[in-house]
Protein backbone atom coordinates (compact mmCIF):
# COMPACT_ATOMS: atom_id res chain seq x y z
CA UNK A 1 0.00 0.00 0.00
CA UNK A 2 2.86 2.37 -0.68
CA UNK A 3 1.99 4.05 -3.98
CA UNK A 4 -1.74 4.59 -3.69
CA UNK A 5 -3.67 7.70 -4.48
CA UNK A 6 -4.10 9.66 -1.20
CA UNK A 7 -7.63 10.46 -2.40
CA UNK A 8 -8.79 6.99 -1.43
CA UNK A 9 -8.52 7.97 2.22
CA UNK A 10 -10.65 11.07 1.92
CA UNK A 11 -14.38 11.53 1.86
CA UNK A 12 -15.88 14.26 -0.32
CA UNK A 13 -19.48 15.16 -0.99
CA UNK A 14 -19.19 14.10 -4.62
CA UNK A 15 -17.95 10.65 -3.54
CA UNK A 16 -20.81 10.29 -1.08
CA UNK A 17 -23.32 11.32 -3.73
CA UNK A 18 -21.95 8.92 -6.32
CA UNK A 19 -21.87 6.13 -3.70
CA UNK A 20 -25.48 6.95 -2.87
CA UNK A 21 -26.44 6.59 -6.53
CA UNK A 22 -24.48 3.34 -6.93
CA UNK A 23 -26.52 1.69 -4.19
CA UNK A 24 -29.91 2.95 -5.41
CA UNK A 25 -30.73 -0.14 -7.50
CA UNK A 26 -30.20 -2.54 -4.60
CA UNK A 27 -31.91 -0.06 -2.25
CA UNK A 28 -35.11 -0.36 -4.24
CA UNK A 29 -35.20 -4.01 -3.20
CA UNK A 30 -34.40 -3.05 0.38
CA UNK A 31 -37.62 -0.99 0.30
CA UNK A 32 -39.50 -4.24 -0.30
CA UNK A 33 -37.73 -6.02 2.57
CA UNK A 34 -38.49 -3.00 4.73
CA UNK A 35 -42.16 -3.24 3.78
CA UNK A 36 -42.14 -6.92 4.67
CA UNK A 37 -40.70 -6.00 8.07
CA UNK A 38 -43.22 -3.20 8.62
CA UNK A 39 -46.06 -5.58 7.87
CA UNK A 40 -44.67 -8.39 10.03
CA UNK A 41 -44.10 -6.00 12.93
CA UNK A 42 -47.65 -4.66 12.69
CA UNK A 43 -48.96 -8.20 12.73
CA UNK A 44 -46.82 -8.93 15.80
CA UNK A 45 -48.60 -6.07 17.54
CA UNK A 46 -46.03 -3.26 17.59
CA UNK A 47 -47.33 0.27 17.16
CA UNK A 48 -46.27 2.27 14.12
CA UNK A 49 -43.96 4.69 15.90
CA UNK A 50 -42.06 1.87 17.64
CA UNK A 51 -41.64 0.08 14.32
CA UNK A 52 -40.25 3.21 12.69
CA UNK A 53 -37.90 3.84 15.61
CA UNK A 54 -36.65 0.29 15.48
CA UNK A 55 -35.89 0.44 11.76
CA UNK A 56 -34.26 3.86 12.10
CA UNK A 57 -32.02 3.11 15.05
CA UNK A 58 -31.32 -0.58 14.66
CA UNK A 59 -31.14 -0.76 10.83
CA UNK A 60 -30.33 -4.46 10.70
CA UNK A 61 -33.09 -6.45 9.03
CA UNK A 62 -32.35 -10.03 10.04
CA UNK A 63 -32.02 -9.16 13.73
CA UNK A 64 -35.22 -7.11 13.63
CA UNK A 65 -37.16 -10.03 12.14
CA UNK A 66 -35.64 -12.34 14.76
CA UNK A 67 -36.72 -9.99 17.55
CA UNK A 68 -40.30 -10.23 16.30
CA UNK A 69 -40.02 -13.99 16.85
CA UNK A 70 -39.13 -13.36 20.51
CA UNK A 71 -41.88 -10.78 20.95
CA UNK A 72 -44.63 -11.70 23.40
CA UNK A 73 -46.22 -10.04 26.42
CA UNK A 74 -42.64 -9.77 27.62
CA UNK A 75 -39.26 -10.43 26.17
CA UNK A 76 -36.31 -12.05 27.96
CA UNK A 77 -33.33 -9.76 28.14
CA UNK A 78 -30.50 -12.27 27.68
CA UNK A 79 -31.96 -14.10 24.64
CA UNK A 80 -32.71 -10.71 23.10
CA UNK A 81 -29.14 -9.49 23.50
CA UNK A 82 -27.63 -12.81 22.39
CA UNK A 83 -29.84 -13.06 19.30
CA UNK A 84 -29.25 -9.50 18.16
CA UNK A 85 -25.54 -9.72 18.87
CA UNK A 86 -24.90 -12.97 17.01
CA UNK A 87 -26.98 -12.09 13.98
CA UNK A 88 -25.14 -8.78 13.72
CA UNK A 89 -21.72 -10.06 14.76
CA UNK A 90 -20.68 -10.14 11.10
CA UNK A 91 -20.53 -6.33 11.34
CA UNK A 92 -17.53 -6.78 13.63
CA UNK A 93 -15.69 -8.66 10.90
CA UNK A 94 -16.89 -6.33 8.15
CA UNK A 95 -15.67 -3.30 10.08
CA UNK A 96 -12.35 -4.99 10.86
CA UNK A 97 -11.84 -5.80 7.17
CA UNK A 98 -12.12 -2.11 6.29
CA UNK A 99 -9.85 -0.94 9.09
CA UNK A 100 -6.70 -0.68 6.91
CA UNK A 101 -8.44 2.12 5.00
CA UNK A 102 -10.74 3.60 7.63
CA UNK A 103 -7.83 4.20 10.01
CA UNK A 104 -6.70 7.09 7.81
CA UNK A 105 -9.87 9.02 8.66
CA UNK A 106 -10.41 11.04 11.82
CA UNK A 107 -12.21 9.05 14.54
CA UNK A 108 -15.36 11.17 14.15
CA UNK A 109 -15.59 10.48 10.42
CA UNK A 110 -14.60 6.84 10.88
CA UNK A 111 -17.28 6.05 13.44
CA UNK A 112 -19.91 8.18 11.67
CA UNK A 113 -19.42 6.19 8.47
CA UNK A 114 -19.71 2.95 10.43
CA UNK A 115 -23.19 3.92 11.62
CA UNK A 116 -24.51 2.82 8.24
CA UNK A 117 -22.24 -0.16 7.49
CA UNK A 118 -24.35 -2.97 6.10
CA UNK A 119 -23.83 -6.00 3.83
CA UNK A 120 -24.27 -4.43 0.41
CA UNK A 121 -22.33 -1.18 0.87
CA UNK A 122 -19.57 -3.00 2.73
CA UNK A 123 -19.13 -5.57 -0.05
CA UNK A 124 -18.99 -2.90 -2.76
CA UNK A 125 -16.63 -0.63 -0.87
CA UNK A 126 -14.24 -3.43 0.05
CA UNK A 127 -14.13 -4.41 -3.61
CA UNK A 128 -13.34 -0.82 -4.59
CA UNK A 129 -10.57 -0.56 -1.96
CA UNK A 130 -9.07 -3.84 -3.12
CA UNK A 131 -8.91 -2.42 -6.66
CA UNK A 132 -7.03 0.57 -5.26
CA UNK A 133 -9.99 2.92 -5.61
CA UNK A 134 -11.80 4.77 -2.85
CA UNK A 135 -14.70 2.93 -1.30
CA UNK A 136 -15.50 5.62 1.28
CA UNK A 137 -18.30 7.13 -0.80
CA UNK A 138 -19.79 3.71 -1.52
CA UNK A 139 -19.69 2.85 2.17
CA UNK A 140 -21.15 6.09 3.50
CA UNK A 141 -23.34 7.36 0.63
CA UNK A 142 -24.42 3.83 -0.17
CA UNK A 143 -25.18 3.21 3.48
CA UNK A 144 -27.37 6.30 3.60
CA UNK A 145 -29.27 5.06 0.54
CA UNK A 146 -29.80 1.66 2.17
CA UNK A 147 -30.87 3.24 5.46
CA UNK A 148 -33.38 5.55 3.77
CA UNK A 149 -34.74 2.61 1.78
CA UNK A 150 -35.08 0.48 4.91
CA UNK A 151 -36.90 3.20 6.87
CA UNK A 152 -39.08 4.21 3.92
CA UNK A 153 -39.94 0.57 3.20
CA UNK A 154 -40.81 -0.04 6.85
CA UNK A 155 -43.29 2.84 6.72
CA UNK A 156 -44.80 1.62 3.48
CA UNK A 157 -45.21 -1.77 5.12
CA UNK A 158 -47.96 -0.51 7.47
CA UNK A 159 -49.98 0.86 4.60
CA UNK A 160 -49.25 -1.26 1.56
CA UNK A 161 -47.71 -4.36 3.10
CA UNK A 162 -50.58 -6.46 1.88
CA UNK A 163 -49.91 -5.63 -1.76
CA UNK A 164 -47.11 -8.14 -2.13
CA UNK A 165 -48.43 -11.32 -0.58
CA UNK A 166 -45.59 -13.66 -1.35
CA UNK A 167 -42.31 -11.89 -2.10
CA UNK A 168 -40.66 -15.32 -2.32
CA UNK A 169 -42.83 -16.29 -5.30
CA UNK A 170 -41.26 -13.36 -7.16
CA UNK A 171 -37.79 -14.43 -6.12
CA UNK A 172 -37.42 -11.26 -4.05
CA UNK A 173 -36.11 -13.10 -1.01
CA UNK A 174 -33.05 -14.00 -3.09
CA UNK A 175 -32.00 -10.47 -4.03
CA UNK A 176 -29.49 -9.98 -1.25
CA UNK A 177 -28.07 -13.50 -1.54
CA UNK A 178 -27.61 -13.14 -5.32
CA UNK A 179 -26.06 -9.73 -4.82
CA UNK A 180 -23.58 -11.02 -2.25
CA UNK A 181 -22.75 -14.03 -4.41
CA UNK A 182 -22.03 -11.73 -7.35
CA UNK A 183 -19.64 -9.83 -5.06
CA UNK A 184 -17.90 -13.05 -4.07
CA UNK A 185 -17.49 -14.17 -7.68
CA UNK A 186 -16.36 -10.70 -8.79
CA UNK A 187 -13.45 -10.69 -6.32
CA UNK A 188 -10.00 -12.11 -6.89
CA UNK A 189 -9.88 -15.86 -7.40
CA UNK A 190 -7.02 -18.30 -7.12
CA UNK A 191 -6.54 -21.75 -5.68
CA UNK A 192 -5.67 -20.37 -2.24
CA UNK A 193 -8.81 -18.23 -2.08
CA UNK A 194 -11.03 -21.02 -3.38
CA UNK A 195 -9.79 -23.44 -0.72
CA UNK A 196 -10.20 -20.80 1.98
CA UNK A 197 -13.78 -20.28 0.79
CA UNK A 198 -14.44 -24.01 0.79
CA UNK A 199 -13.25 -24.23 4.39
CA UNK A 200 -15.37 -21.21 5.33
CA UNK A 201 -18.42 -22.82 3.68
CA UNK A 202 -17.90 -26.20 5.37
CA UNK A 203 -17.30 -24.74 8.83
CA UNK A 204 -20.32 -22.45 8.41
CA UNK A 205 -22.51 -25.44 7.54
CA UNK A 206 -21.20 -27.47 10.48
CA UNK A 207 -21.89 -24.53 12.79
CA UNK A 208 -25.33 -24.12 11.19
CA UNK A 209 -26.19 -27.73 11.99
CA UNK A 210 -24.41 -28.35 15.28
CA UNK A 211 -23.71 -25.05 17.05
CA UNK A 212 -26.19 -22.57 18.57
CA UNK A 213 -28.34 -20.63 16.13
CA UNK A 214 -26.86 -17.63 14.32
CA UNK A 215 -23.25 -18.57 14.99
CA UNK A 216 -22.48 -19.88 11.49
CA UNK A 217 -21.39 -16.65 9.78
CA UNK A 218 -18.86 -15.80 12.46
CA UNK A 219 -17.55 -19.36 12.72
CA UNK A 220 -17.15 -19.72 8.93
CA UNK A 221 -15.49 -16.33 8.54
CA UNK A 222 -13.06 -16.95 11.42
CA UNK A 223 -12.05 -20.35 10.07
CA UNK A 224 -11.48 -18.84 6.62
CA UNK A 225 -9.44 -16.05 8.16
CA UNK A 226 -7.33 -18.40 10.27
CA UNK A 227 -6.45 -20.53 7.24
CA UNK A 228 -5.43 -17.28 5.56
CA UNK A 229 -2.97 -16.53 8.36
CA UNK A 230 -1.12 -19.80 7.98
CA UNK A 231 -1.28 -20.18 4.21
CA UNK A 232 0.79 -17.37 2.81
CA UNK A 233 0.19 -15.95 -0.62
CA UNK A 234 2.98 -16.48 -3.12
CA UNK A 235 4.75 -13.20 -3.66
CA UNK A 236 4.58 -12.21 -7.31
CA UNK B 1 -31.59 -15.55 36.23
CA UNK B 2 -34.06 -14.56 33.59
CA UNK B 3 -34.76 -10.87 33.24
CA UNK B 4 -37.99 -10.12 31.47
CA UNK B 5 -38.90 -6.80 29.88
CA UNK B 6 -42.53 -6.02 29.29
CA UNK B 7 -43.29 -5.24 25.66
CA UNK B 8 -45.66 -2.49 26.83
CA UNK B 9 -42.47 -0.43 26.90
CA UNK B 10 -41.04 -1.17 23.45
CA UNK B 11 -38.65 1.79 23.65
CA UNK B 12 -36.46 -0.01 26.16
CA UNK B 13 -36.25 -3.03 23.88
CA UNK B 14 -35.48 -0.90 20.84
CA UNK B 15 -32.81 0.95 22.81
CA UNK B 16 -31.13 -2.33 23.81
CA UNK B 17 -31.24 -3.60 20.22
CA UNK B 18 -29.79 -0.34 18.92
CA UNK B 19 -26.92 -0.35 21.43
CA UNK B 20 -26.03 -4.00 20.76
CA UNK B 21 -26.13 -3.45 16.98
CA UNK B 22 -24.06 -0.29 17.21
CA UNK B 23 -21.50 -2.18 19.29
CA UNK B 24 -21.12 -4.65 16.40
CA UNK B 25 -20.82 -1.83 13.84
CA UNK B 26 -18.15 0.00 15.83
CA UNK B 27 -16.50 -2.92 17.62
CA UNK B 28 -14.53 -4.41 14.74
CA UNK B 29 -12.78 -1.15 13.90
CA UNK B 30 -12.32 -0.29 17.58
CA UNK B 31 -10.62 -3.62 18.28
CA UNK B 32 -8.45 -3.33 15.17
CA UNK B 33 -7.25 0.09 16.27
CA UNK B 34 -5.46 -1.65 19.15
CA UNK B 35 -4.00 -4.40 16.96
CA UNK B 36 -0.87 -3.59 14.98
CA UNK B 37 -1.47 -4.41 11.30
CA UNK B 38 1.20 -7.03 10.70
CA UNK B 39 1.42 -9.27 7.64
CA UNK B 40 -0.42 -11.96 9.55
CA UNK B 41 -3.26 -9.63 10.48
CA UNK B 42 -3.46 -8.40 6.90
CA UNK B 43 -3.70 -11.98 5.62
CA UNK B 44 -6.34 -12.77 8.21
CA UNK B 45 -8.41 -9.76 7.16
CA UNK B 46 -8.16 -10.59 3.45
CA UNK B 47 -9.10 -14.23 3.89
CA UNK B 48 -11.81 -13.47 6.44
CA UNK B 49 -13.57 -10.78 4.40
CA UNK B 50 -14.54 -13.08 1.51
CA UNK B 51 -15.25 -15.87 3.98
CA UNK B 52 -17.95 -13.76 5.68
CA UNK B 53 -19.96 -13.81 2.47
CA UNK B 54 -19.30 -17.47 1.74
CA UNK B 55 -20.28 -18.42 5.29
CA UNK B 56 -23.47 -16.39 4.94
CA UNK B 57 -24.38 -18.01 1.62
CA UNK B 58 -23.47 -21.67 2.33
CA UNK B 59 -26.57 -22.55 4.42
CA UNK B 60 -28.85 -20.72 1.95
CA UNK B 61 -27.44 -22.84 -0.87
CA UNK B 62 -27.58 -26.12 1.06
CA UNK B 63 -30.71 -25.71 3.19
CA UNK B 64 -32.77 -23.45 0.90
CA UNK B 65 -35.42 -24.65 -1.53
CA UNK B 66 -34.65 -25.52 -5.16
CA UNK B 67 -35.67 -22.01 -6.16
CA UNK B 68 -32.99 -20.54 -3.89
CA UNK B 69 -30.37 -22.95 -5.19
CA UNK B 70 -31.31 -22.26 -8.79
CA UNK B 71 -31.08 -18.50 -8.15
CA UNK B 72 -27.57 -18.80 -6.73
CA UNK B 73 -26.44 -21.17 -9.47
CA UNK B 74 -27.77 -18.84 -12.18
CA UNK B 75 -26.08 -15.83 -10.60
CA UNK B 76 -22.82 -17.78 -10.36
CA UNK B 77 -22.88 -18.87 -14.00
CA UNK B 78 -23.91 -15.50 -15.44
CA UNK B 79 -21.34 -13.75 -13.28
CA UNK B 80 -18.55 -16.09 -14.44
CA UNK B 81 -19.56 -15.81 -18.11
CA UNK B 82 -20.50 -12.14 -18.43
CA UNK B 83 -18.84 -10.58 -15.34
CA UNK B 84 -21.80 -8.21 -15.02
CA UNK B 85 -23.18 -8.13 -11.45
CA UNK B 86 -26.53 -6.47 -12.26
CA UNK B 87 -27.29 -8.96 -15.02
CA UNK B 88 -26.19 -11.85 -12.83
CA UNK B 89 -28.42 -10.75 -9.94
CA UNK B 90 -31.41 -10.13 -12.23
CA UNK B 91 -30.98 -13.55 -13.84
CA UNK B 92 -30.79 -15.20 -10.42
CA UNK B 93 -33.99 -13.57 -9.17
CA UNK B 94 -35.78 -14.38 -12.41
CA UNK B 95 -34.68 -18.01 -12.17
CA UNK B 96 -36.09 -18.31 -8.63
CA UNK B 97 -39.31 -16.55 -9.62
CA UNK B 98 -39.91 -18.71 -12.71
CA UNK B 99 -39.08 -21.91 -10.88
CA UNK B 100 -41.40 -21.11 -7.99
CA UNK B 101 -44.23 -19.99 -10.31
CA UNK B 102 -44.23 -23.20 -12.30
CA UNK B 103 -42.86 -25.94 -10.09
CA UNK B 104 -44.06 -25.17 -6.57
Image (tube, helix red, strand yellow):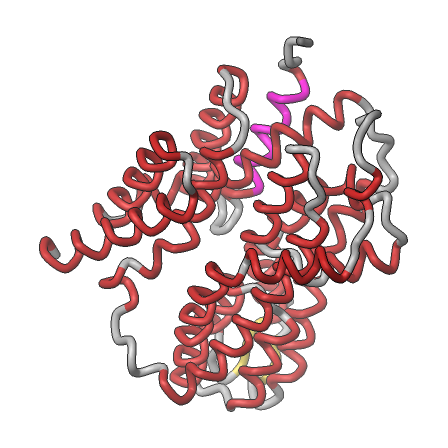
> Residue A181, image x and y in percent?
43, 41
Q: Quadrant of the C terminus of chain A?
A: top right
> Residue B7, image x and y in percent?
56, 85
- Residue A77 occupies which quadrant of the picture? bottom right
Please, what is the dominant secondary structure of the magenta stretch? helix
> Residue A142, image x and y in percent?
61, 59
Q: Which residues are magenta?
A: A218-229
> Residue A202, image x and y in percent?
43, 29
Magenta-span inclusion, residue A221: yes
Magenta-span inclusion, residue A216: no
- Residue A131 occupies which quadrant of the picture? top right
Q: Residue at x 68, y 27 (%)?
A: B44
In front: A49, or A208?
A: A49
Q: Residue at x 61, y 62 (%)?
A: A20
- Above or below, A127 against A89 in this view is above
A172 sits left or right of B56 in the view: left
- Above or below, B2 against A107 in this view is below
Q: Residue at x 43, y 54 (%)?
A: A176
A9 sits left or right of B18 in the view: right
Q: Residue at x 29, y 81 (%)?
A: A163
Residue extending farthest to the left is B102
In front: B66, or A8?
A: A8
- Above or below, B2 against A233 in this view is below
Q: Quadrant of the N terminus of chain A?
A: top right
Residue extending farthest to the front is A14
Amino acid sequence: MSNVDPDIYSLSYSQVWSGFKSLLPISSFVVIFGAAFGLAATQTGLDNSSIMLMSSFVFAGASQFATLELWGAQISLIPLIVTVFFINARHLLMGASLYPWLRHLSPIKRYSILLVISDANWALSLQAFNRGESGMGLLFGGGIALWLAWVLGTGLGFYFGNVIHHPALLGLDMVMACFLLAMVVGGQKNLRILIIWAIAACSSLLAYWYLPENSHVVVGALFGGIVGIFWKEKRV
Amino acid sequence: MNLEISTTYPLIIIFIMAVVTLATRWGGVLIMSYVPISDRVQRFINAMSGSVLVALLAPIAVEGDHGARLALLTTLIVMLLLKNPLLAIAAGILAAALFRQYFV
